[in-house]
Amino acid sequence: MEEENRGAPTETSASFLDDWSHGTVWFEDWIPGERPWGREEILTEVPRALKGHYAVRVGATTKMDGWRYREGDWIRFADRADLAARLPELATVTDFVFPWYDRVVPAALVRRETQRIDGTAYRADCQRRFFQALLITCGLIAASYYVPQARMLALVAVSYFGLFPLVDAAMAWGRRLDLLSVEELNRRLVNFVFFHRWLAKKSSPSLAIGLGILVAVFLGQVWVGLPDSIGAAALMKDRVREEGEWWRLVTSGLMHANALHILFNGMALYNFGKVMTALVSPALLGVVFLTTVVTGSLASLYLGSSGASVGASGGILGCLGFLLMLTWRFRALLPGSLRVGLIQSTIVVSIFGLLGSDFIDNAAHAGGFLGGLALGLVMAPSLTLAPEKTGLFTRVLSGLSLTVLGLGIAKIAAELWKIHALAG
């Protein structure tokens, strides 16, 4: 079982409590103290009312002893025997509290590995998940061609419910976790859980502002009409070549074609951007996004079709490429599952692009991704993992990038206002 797939112990036996003899915390020696997330403070402090008690937090609505507990509520138990006896009644548990430990223990950390993964069962599970995902993928792809009106939505479903599980199962087979020692399994588990707890606690105000601006730009497009807005500031290849409107290389990456387009681009930008701002510096997000929006637009201009191109996908794929280089640079510290997830995203996006080549600008995607890889190759050797301060050079680059992006937004606003004025 991969460490990221571990959940709450919901089996009828509470044997995991054997790992929690009074006064012991089995994972304390495995906390990666040499890494930014290697601190017990990453785990939430036990609420005052629960200190000195056994308790669990439920992950779904639960009834017990005539009481109804909602998702996120705590249930306190009289003692260890009471917890062991009542635990099988709970469908989902997300966190545990033990009397002698002042931190809330995530369900993924409540049980340690005591033996190596059974190789036969592991490979059988990989095969089962692979063929199940392959069947779903083929079915959804067929549906996407039989219902052309919902082609884009169907292909999105293919990605999330078919391609991601398919690639995940194939890569799990290649990772061969069944060959790892018990010690290595536990080390990876603790590093994974602490890293993701740390990542969840990192705030990203610059990312939130950026997403808000993209939404505001899209609302402006809706205000004047999407077709007219695309003609006004998207990447119109003939206007760039013949009339010298090179500013469209930037403005096209700040606009979107429809609500579904900005929804999924926004989700992807948030996911990649949150990781990037945590690993290096929030100041780099604007630099990477602007640079790769431009490399994506240039690839679309010279290698893509003649039609108009619009969307932040070049910049988003640029963030993905940059993150791949970062995870390689810090591979000895970061959970291996993070890099695996990024590789999975790259493979799925590539297949998605091939399946939707009639409405996806694959040249822009490739240009942005390669631009991100190149930028990461140049910058990664000089970067520090989760630095406390941002260097002067990075701050200058960030300021210049944000200025250019700001001018791009102003140009879009001016073009949209012209459309509104003419319509009035």
Image: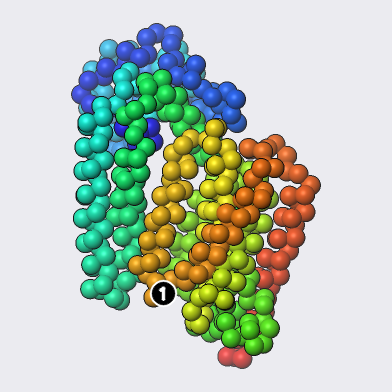
Tell me where residue 104 sits by quadrant: top left
Instruction: Report x, y in % for residue 134.
Output: 24, 54
Q: Is residue 387 left or right of residue 115?
A: right
Mark 1 lies on a secondary structure that is loop
Q: How is the image coloured?
A: rainbow
Q: Is residue 295 left or right of residue 180?
A: right
Q: Residues within 10 Å of mark 1 (few under 14, many from 20)?
A: few
Instruction: Report x, y in % for residue 183.
Output: 41, 20
Between 81 and 312, the residue placed more toward the observer is 312
Q: Residue at x 73, y 39 (%)?
A: 389
Looking at the image, is 20 positioned above or below residue 186?
above
Q: Is residue 141 left or right of residue 105?
A: left
Q: Is residue 315 visible?
A: no
Q: Residue at x 30, y 76 (%)?
A: 149
Residue farthest to the top, as pictured: 22
Instruction: Report x, y in % for residue 272.
Output: 52, 51
Q: Residue at x 34, y 34 (%)?
A: 176
Looking at the image, is 59 positioned above or below residue 14?
below
Please, what is the three-letter code of the amino acid marked with disc 1?
Phe
Q: Residue at x 25, y 27 (%)?
A: 118
Looking at the image, is 24 positioned above or below residue 131?
above
Q: Is residue 322 left or right of residue 28?
A: right
Q: Quadrant of the C terminus?
A: bottom right
Tell me where residue 367 sits by quadrant: bottom right
**What residue sits right under mark 1 in the picture?**
359
Instruction: Report x, y in % for residue 46.
Output: 48, 23
Q: Is residue 272 visible?
A: yes
